[in-house]
Image (tube, helix red, strand yellow):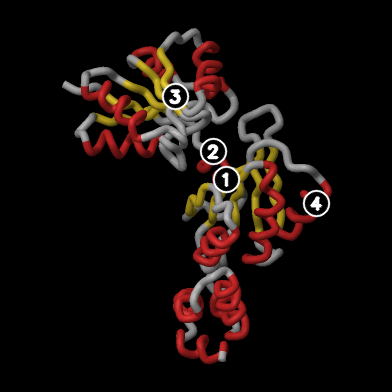
Amino acid sequence: MSGIFYVIGTPIGNLDDITIRQLETLKAVDFICAEDTRVTLKLLNRFEIKKQLVSFHEHSSKIDAQRIVDRLIAGEDCGIVTDAGMPCISDPGEVLVKMCVENNIDIRVVPGPSAVVSAVAISGLSTRRFTFEGFLPVQKKERMERLEQLRGETAVMVFYEAPHKLKNTLFDLADFFGGDRKISLCRELTKIHEEVLRLTLAEAVAFYDENEPKGEFVLVLEGTHDNMGEEITIEQAVEQVNRLISMGEKPTAACKAVAKETGFKKSELYAKLQ
């Protein structure tokens, strides 16, 4: 009989947020998969837990994953954790979950704090609907294509961002969504220097031009209002088409994408390009 694969949430900053069930599960499993074993070791030492740690991160190979699955198939119980929060969400552990499903291995969740949900809850924006986008692509073309897909999004959008990339990201968001769009910048959640700035995108760009970003950020961006999409002119739609073309899209594909977002016909957008 195969073992059990436990997906274990851990504190996102304040270690006092650990739960009784998380501690009991970490003590009970045969081994623990960790994104960074050094980070996880600090957590285990804090609560006097001695357990074998196996490194599993974004650069781990399929062979590494198979070794873990083989141990589960052999009957060992495994817990997976990330550096902070819930593993397997925008996280390498997703691979192991899929492999466990393929091998009919029992998967159980031991929930814990989530930076995404925590940031949305205190953002001050609408919480009825939100979409988690993780980290935006680093490459300019892929990043612009992703933002173009989100241009008409009415739900709140949640992004992760590192401090050294924050300024560029805020500039790109302001360029695409307009400087008056509201954003909540949640920094170092649950830690000593926790801070939430509720600004417009223009104000956020200006603020971080004067202040160097520090700590990890969760960005909660207001969605477009329903009437915003109705106000776009065909000239603005053509600008979107030209932006996509400048990023390498073929004119017909760019017109089709913008037509879907704006409601204009692909043919009339294409005609404006001639």
Q: Earlier in the sequence, mark 2 or mark 3?
A: 3
Q: Nearer the viewer, residue 121 or 137?
A: 137
Task: Using the image, determine if residue 184 lies above or below residue 82.
Answer: below
Amino acid identity at mark 2: Ala
Element carrying mark 4: helix
Identified at 34% across, 35% down, the residue is 62
Question: Which residue occupies the foreground of this view, 168 or 201?
Answer: 168
Residue at mark 1 to residue at mark 4: CA–CA distance: 19 Å
Look at the numbered discs 2 and 1 and tell me whether their residues touch, using CB distance below 8 Å: yes
* Residue 209: image tag: 4
Q: Is 123 positioned to the left or the right of 145 in the image?
A: right
Element at badge 3? strand
Amino acid type for the residue under numbered disc 1: Tyr
What amino acid is labelled 3 in the image?
A: Ser
Compared across the picture, whether 239 is left or right of 171 comes to left
Between marks 3 and 1, how big is the CA–CA gap?
23 Å
Mark 1 residue element: strand
- Give percent across and percent down for residue 38: 54, 20
Q: Nearer the viewer, mark 2 or mark 1?
A: 1
Nearest to viewer (mark 3 / mark 1): 3
Q: Where is residue 179 drawn, in percent x and y?
A: 71, 64
